[in-house]
Image (tube, rainbow, N blue to C red):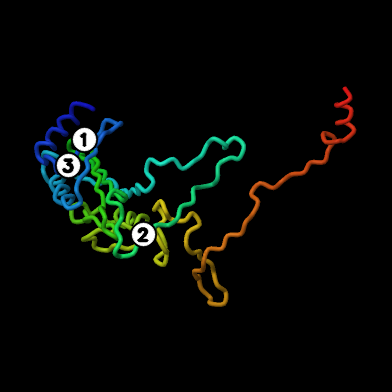
Amino acid sequence: MTESYEALLARIDTRFGDQMAVLPTVCGELTFEVDKKNVRGIAEILKDDPEFAFEQLLDVCGVDYLTYGEAEWKTESATETGFSRGVEREPVILDESETFDPCRFAVVYHLLSVTRNYRLRLRVFAGESNPPIVQSLVPVWNSANWFEREVFDLFGVLFDGHPDLRRIMTDYGFIGHPFRKDFPLSGNVEVKYDPEKGRVAYQPVTIEERTLVPRVIRDDNRYSGALKESFNDD
């Protein structure tokens, strides 16, 4: 870590104390974990205080830590059988009374200070709430608007205080959130044009089994019985 980032780390530690916990990094930059109830207040200070001056929010990313650290691919027999196209999981569908693992869903904010040439990341866990909810940072950085809509659409994280939280990547009638680890690889529904209804309609997923690599039966002199017998005689 450079001297400038070490100085930034010291200033953040002095200003916020245990409100921001530094995380290990391998790229020489700073990443902090922030409690979701404090994220908006901390973001306002990081942006408006000239000591930090993080004027830009570059990106907001969702993370699903379901099965994090677990091995999903068995490689012992891969030489003979090859890998499958993906890992199938049972969807995690909770009742309203049930809760998520508090460290399953996280939101990561990428900040840039043009004035001081710093980059900073904040990670916020959504906690046990079902559905997962964190505070919106649109009142702090207007660029958070579409980023948070994307996280909501793909991961199902709600943002409290967002002015227009609706899907942005998938169709409005889409079922589920496709970046969740337990989302089925084939999806839940498919879309097709229905000539009888005269419009695009949804229907259950229908996938026909097919052979992607056809079996080839060769019939040439390499497989000639006479040649095989001649080889064996030699």
State the CA–CA distance, disc 1 to disc 2: 31 Å
Q: Where is residue 209 in the image (x, y as percent from the top left)?
A: 62, 56
The image shows residue 173 at horizontal and vertical percentages of 41, 67
Residue 210 falls in image quadrant? bottom right
> Residue 51 vs residue 92: left or right?
left
Give the amino acid type for the residue marked by disc 3 in the picture: Met
Q: Name the residue under label 3.
A: 20
**The C terminus appears in which quarter of the rendering?**
top right
* Residue 78: percent from left, percent from top: 57, 37
Identify the residue at horizontal 50%, vertical 64% (top origin): 190
Q: Which residue was labeled with disc 2?
A: 168
Above or below for 19 versus 163: above
Binning the other alpha carbons within 10 Å of mark 1 as few (below 14), some (14 to 19) or many (20 upward) gives few
Front residue of 127 and 135: 127
Of circles 2 and 3, the one toward us is 3
Kindly identify the residue that appears in the image at 25 percent across and 41 percent down.
121
Quadrant of the snapshot with the N terminus: top left
Residue that carries the numbered disc 1 in the rendered image: 117
Q: Which of marks 3 and 1 is nearer the N terminus?
A: 3
Q: Check disc 2 and report its element: helix, strand or loop.
A: loop
Q: In the image, what residue occupies the spot 30% across and 61% down?
A: 98
Amino acid carrying label 2: it is: Ile
How many angstroms separate mark 3 from mark 1 (CA)?
20 Å
In the displayed orientation, state which residue is furthest to the front.
Answer: 98
**Numbered label attached to residue 26:** none
Vertical side of 137 occupied by 203: above or below: below
